[in-house]
Image (tube, helix red, strand yellow):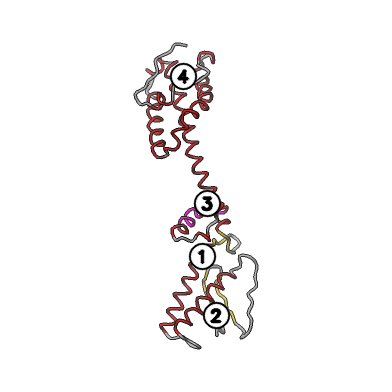
Amino acid sequence: MLQSLDIRNLTVFVEAHLRFSPRLNVIVGENGSGKSHLLKVVYAVLAASAEEGCKSTASAPTKTLLQTKVSAAACEATSRYVLREDGNMGTNAELYNADFYAWCLTTAALIREGKWHNIDLESAAEELESLGRSQKRELESRLEVLMMHLLKWCYQPERREDSHSWYDTIVEQRSQLARLLRDNPSLRPQVSTLLTEEYPNARRRAIGETQIFAAVFPPACPWTADQGLDAEFWPKTLSP
């Protein structure tokens, strides 16, 4: 029978001294106070004692086994929780709101260890969806910048002589778009639609930067998606 348990530097416990009665024992505490941690440690101690056939005192090998079991229990408990500013332990979901970087590292470790029950699945799903949306937003943004510079290339040819910035920007955007679509091939079928959607923004920006009358620029995108992405395609010069 387990009569007492002394704990030091375990998760939320700096030092704790537990004494057990021979009958029913109840652990009471607020949420996050460490009750589950205590139960894990008690279970580890009892399991180790049972394995060694120990009834009262533990031999040196048994003590080593107990320490190993307790350490394992502590690591499992800690992997699910994060120390909050108030000194109490919070869940994986609370870590998501408190420290996103730490949440990413912790959740990745839990996934690799197969501890799915310790993961805040809703937060994980939300972040996966957010990652997908960020790839689409990057595609939209790069298409807009590409279209804007292609318009300036067409309607202000004299400015090409001033610097290579337009040329460099067009080449860079096409290069980055090629990489983005290579890594996310499922986005490629959306390029034509997104090109149509982003063209009005590109047109407005081109009007603002060139100071050319709005009526000069085509109201709809004059190029296909293949032309826009083609590294060898350079639109003909058009006069305002």
Q: Position of residue 222 (x, y in %)?
A: 46, 19
Mark 1 element type? helix
Q: Give, as a three-letter code, the residue at label 3.
A: Ala
Q: Quadrant of residue 178?
A: top left
Q: How far, Cα to Cα, is label 1 from label 2? A: 19 Å
Measured from the top left, where is residue 203 in percent x and y? Answer: 51, 21
The mark closer to the camera, 2 or 4, is 4
In this figure, which residue is indicated by the disc labeled 3?
Answer: 124
Contact between marks 4 and 1 (CB within 8 A): the answer is no
Residue at disc 3, secondary structure: helix
**Rendered image: mark on residue 69:** none
- Foreground: 160 or 182? 182
Give the residue at mark 4.
222
Q: Quadrant of the N terminus?
A: bottom right
Circle nearer the N terminus (1, 2): 2
Q: Earlier in the sequence, mark 3 or mark 4?
A: 3
The answer to whether mark 2 and mark 4 are in CB contact below 8 A is no
How many numbered tags mark residues here? 4
**Which residue is situated farthest in the left direction here?**
232
The reply to whether the magenta stretch includes residue 104 is yes
Q: Which residue is mark 1?
A: 78
Q: Earlier in the sequence, mark 3 or mark 1?
A: 1
Q: Is residue 139 above or below residue 126?
A: above
Q: Tell me the residue at 53%/25% (across/down).
A: 201
Start-end of magenta stretch: 98-108
Mark drawn on residue 5:
2
Q: Determine the residue positioned at 49% across, 32% down.
A: 140
Give the alpha-carbon distance from disc 2 to disc 4, as whole Å.
78 Å
Image x and y of residue 179, in percent: 38, 36
Disc 3 versus disc 1: nearer the observer: 3
- Above or below: residue 71 compared with residue 187: below
Earlier in the chain: of badge 4 and badge 1, it is 1
